[in-house]
Image: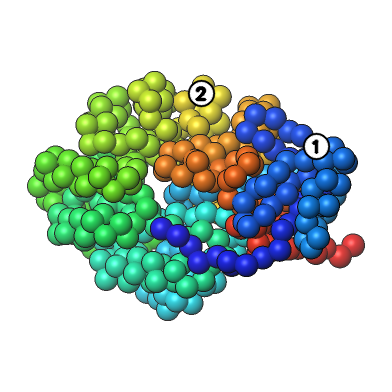
Amino acid sequence: MNDRLSASMKPLIVMNGKVILPDKIVEAAVAIVDGRIDAILESEEAIRNWRRLHSSFTSVDAAKQYVLPGLIDIHCDAIEKEVQPRPNTLFPLDMALLEFERKLPVHGITTMYHSLSLGVGLSLRGDHLLTGMVEHINSYRTKRSMIRNRIHLRFEVSHLAGMPIVERYLDEKAIDYLSFMDHSPGQGQYREPGSFERYVMKNQGVSVDEVRVIVEELLQRRQLVNGEHLLKLSKLAAKRGIAIASHDDDSVEKIEESAGYGVSVCEFPINLETAKFAAERGMRVCVGAPNVVRGASHDKNLRAVDAIAADAADILCSDYHPSSMLAAVFKLADEGIAALPSAVRMVTLHPAQALGTGSELGSIELGKAADLIIVDRYDGQPWVTNTIVGGQIVYRAAVRY
């Protein structure tokens, strides 16, 4: 799906940057023409020659700061909180998307896979709101765009009534990424007794009796799940070139089952054994940036840094906290868990490759879309000073001292 980005713009050159390429850091200028990376210029002579060829251009001084590819977030459900910041407080979908999108360049995110849940039955996760938001995002991104807005449909496998919706979206290619989820109690994220009930009561404000009904109905639906239904969806996704993820896998057996459904991305494995097996099997393994920043899982599951250190995870997503992506990258580098170019790949090139856009996005290489961010540091924390999407400056920060 193409985004409506500016069709006419001057050539642009980002000067004096520490440019993070896929495998190294170089001091260079990045030249952009027609929204694409035209040249990586590592000498004054090369810069002068490029300038001679372009009589009119815009220049941005990176001032010795880092120049990174724009961040690609393949799993973030923060848009749901923008629509419903508290239980039973819904805001208009058009307002929510507009306000949420303009926050993302501040965090360096230039491609966002808005993660929308179908069938969980909690919070902003009813069918009518899900379909409304999918349709609104699809309409919006054909008209205007600050970033590249994508849709990650998270399908609760026990929601059999939602199958026709998923089939229609796959057939129309109205979504860009699909994941199969199972939030039923007793396994995955909620394998600890009572953990599902505590989560629902805390976040949805329901009573003990109400949550008991929710659990009973969910477990009844879970018993009706048919693998043939999921296989049908996976074949349709493959036909449309849409990647499929699993969610909260907690065993080797779960990974094998997921692989049978064409899953190529393992999101948030519960333990290190499962993460390692998924990686060995050739899956991309995605862990949460908030987990890296905080040093632990909020559900007391796998520590993301342990998976990364063991080469059992190669993608970071923001999950629910967009500002964590950039902070996690620099924390991994500062603590020696990963070299900076390697950490950057986890939020740029690897997610692009996993979702089939690696030839277009995810790295600073000739011919690719010019999605760039300039990153400074203050008191050790990274912060974005400029965000460029498709060769157009969409965000620029100024600081007073």
Instruction: Tell me where residue 30 appears, x and y as whole percent.
Output: 73, 46
Instruction: Tell me where residue 306 appears, x and y as whole percent.
Output: 53, 27
Report the quarter where the N terminus lies.
Answer: bottom left
Q: Is residue 201 visible?
A: no
Residue 80, picture quadrant: bottom left
Callout 2: 10 Å neighbours few (<14), some, many (20+)?
some
**Please, what secondary structure does the residue beneath circle 2 have?**
loop
Q: Report which residue position mark 2 lands on.
A: 311
Circle on res. 362? none
Query: Which three-letter amino acid code belongs to the residue tagged 1?
Result: Glu
Circle on res. 42? 1
**Please, what secondary structure does the residue beneath circle 1 have?**
loop
Instruction: Tell me where residue 7 appears, x and y as whole percent.
Output: 58, 66
Q: Which of the two labelled residues, at mark 1 and mark 2, occupies the earlier sequence position?
A: 1
Residue 267, picture quadrant: top left
Callout 1: 10 Å neighbours few (<14), some, many (20+)?
some
Q: Are marks 1 and 2 in contact (CB under 8 Å)?
A: no
Q: Residue at horizontal 43%, vertical 33%?
A: 285
Task: Single out the mark in the foreground, 1 or 2.
Answer: 1
Query: Which three-letter amino acid code belongs to the residue tagged 2?
Result: Asp
Q: Residue at horizontal 34%, vertical 56%?
A: 175
Instruction: Tell me where residue 133 appears, x and y as whole percent.
Output: 36, 68
Q: With 397 as the anchor, is 263 left or right in this view?
A: left
Judging depth in this view, the residue of 47 and 93 nearest the camera is 47
Judging depth in this view, the residue of 209 and 376 nearest the camera is 376
Q: Is residue 386 above or below residue 271?
A: below
Q: Is residue 340 above or below residue 88?
A: above
Report the quarter where the C terminus lies.
Answer: bottom right
